Image (cartoon, helix red, strand yellow):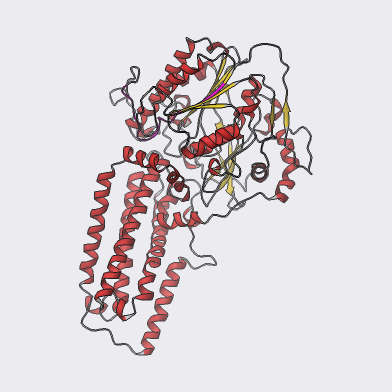
Amino acid sequence: MIAFLNKLPRLHIYVGQYVISLLILQSLLRVAFLFSFSPVTNPVPGSDLAWAFYLGLKYDLQFALILSLPILLLGWVSNTHPVFSSLGKRIWTGYIVVTVFFLMIMHASNFGYYAYLNQGIDATALRFLENPFISATMVWQSYPVIWGALILAALIWGYYRLLKKANLHIDTNKPLKVKWKGKTGIVIVTFFVVFFGLLGKISYYPLRWSDAFFSSTHTFTAYLASNPTMYFYNTLKNTVETYDLEATQKYYPLMTEYLGVDQPDPETLNYTRTVSFEDDGSKKPNVVIVILESFASYKTGLSGNPLNPTPNIDQIAKDGVYFNNFFVPHTGTARSVWALITGLPDIEKNRTSTRNPLIVRQHSIANDFTGYDRTYFLGGSASWANIRGLLSSNIENLTIHEEGSYESERVDVWGISDLSLFKEANEVLKNKKGPFLSIIQTSGNHRPYTIPEDNDDFVELSEADTEFKPEDYGFQDFKELNSFHFMDHSIGRFMAMARQEDYFDNTLFVFFGDHGIANSTGKHTAKSEEYLGVSGHRVPLVLYGPKILKQTGINRKVASELDVLPTIAALTKNSYTNTTLGRDLFDTAFDKMRYAFTILHGSFRTIGLLTEQHFQQMKFDGSDQYLHELGTETPNKNLIEEEPELNDTMMTYTTAINATVRYIRENNQPKQ
């Protein structure tokens, strides 16, 4: 075999070994990714796994060929030849070590990013560099950085030694003598091999990153198939986006009816709705909004989770109003805070809207709570994700309480614990004289899942406390389960403290998750929750206020995070002006058109619309449409042909809402 290879050009042997070694290395990393993150409760079919590895091999070949091009193009020069020139050997050995180093860094980052957010690394990860100290601290506290670095160094050293050993078998005694016809043939063959390897498939279009998303029902296969480095690069290709005026005008009549616009005007594209309440002289109710970190519905007792992780929020829901079909537009905390404050989904491509200075200032219903004291509490720094800029730009006379302003000690990268945050908030709220609007944003249910020593007798769950395994019901392990359980424990302590204060009886409490988690949802949920990624959007919305709410129990109507502020304003009888997409959830005039808009970010942005029974999705440009039924054992079935009218209706509203959001966000600054 070696004798045969030495009849080939030495440069090609050298490059061939490099390409093959990269394919083997990346395939092994893909196997490691599979064993690390393969869904437990709803395993991926074997046929999908086989196709993912097949596509992955082609992506890896593309990447390996791209890395080999400099050697092919420059290595033929005698002074830089990787086999016959000592200088060339040093240059290309260094090049190979550097490329493998960065390849390993990208794969390691992809592992960490997927463990963190259950999605492959893309350009949105760059947002973490804007707060490098917080991000670095979180990584240090969550992952075995030192051991990981040592393993990474060992792998790179091992790769270098194996490749060096393989190169020893290349005959360096004399160059291969080939006539000009042979050289021409070698060049032509090399060109076509590289060209078709980069093309990836024989079709009108080459192999692209979007081909990895071959399954509309199990996103894990897409991230398994993708090459992390190439996928990250493709998501960097972002262009500045703006609205399509023609599309906005086209859907304006439909949207004005959907929103209940007071005086539709196609010329000015007015979306204003004014809701007024008579002042009866009574004291205005207080409002406390609690944003719960990663509070996915399937992890709560409200979903029937047998681990009983949330007894406190379950009881609050029982005594209040629980919306079990409540959805946030997207995953990601910063995007969720944006949606709450502005009443608009965050459609920014790579960066969050909170980081876009051109659109960060919006009209917010929060300012219509006239005479209210406004406060915002979070355990860490408001500099994170430019949340300070969002809050300061949109909520007038807002007092922000953050790290550095508390007596409680910081417990990890996210600041003080959730329990301490609630205690600090209660100390401030109990001294308020007039009505107040307060937002409390938790962050403890987050890696590194810290349970503080000062925990008010919190009892951690263990194998002795339950017959059920956490991994069978939406949790990775007991550490994550206890973090979630501690968040609920903190809620219980907060409500117990609040009940002792004068403000409690006249306060509307609002609890909801900032986002869900697109992960294995557990045996107690329908397959569609995981397969269709609904679990990333479905979170509980719980309203509690015995003297304010006229009804209690489960409310099954479809609700969106965009609806939270107008609903609160209506319940507390605060007159407000609405210029965005939120609608009062208790206004029956909208009950025939209750939808929840969703968007999955990245270059492949997918927009969708949820009803109680269906989920319609399509790419941002309207292509690749899917209509799925929720709550079935066959969530992967596309119903477009069976339900064409339903699909057309939902597609129209999805497109209309998307076009309207793009317009409003650039034309919604508050009047001076």
Whether residue 451 appears in magenta in the rendering, the answer is: yes
Q: In the picture, which quadrant includes the N terminus?
A: bottom left
Residue at 44% x, 47% y: name it. Answer: 125
User: Which residue shows up at 67% across the image and 29% down it?
Assistant: 591
Q: Which quadrant holds residue 565?
A: top right
Q: Quadrant of residue 154?
A: bottom left
- Taking depth in this image into account, of 88 and 593 the one nearest to the observer is 88
For the record, the magenta segment spans 437-453
Residue 626 appears in the rendering: no
Q: Nearer the viewer, residue 637 or 513?
A: 513
Q: Is residue 405 above or below residue 128?
A: above
Name the spot of residue 396 as percent of width and height, x first.
Answer: 61, 29
Quarter that holds the C terminus: top right
Residue 527 in the image, given as x and y percentages of width and height:
47, 38
Examine the rendered structure and indicate whether residue 221 appears above or below residue 21: above
Please name whichever residue, 219 or 606, is drawn nearer the observer in this view of the structure: 606
- Residue 585 is situated, as x and y percent measured from the top left of the image, at 64, 26
416 and 107: which is toward the camera: 416
Residue 574 located within the stretch drawn in magenta:
no
Looking at the image, residue 425 sits to the left or right of residue 615; the answer is left
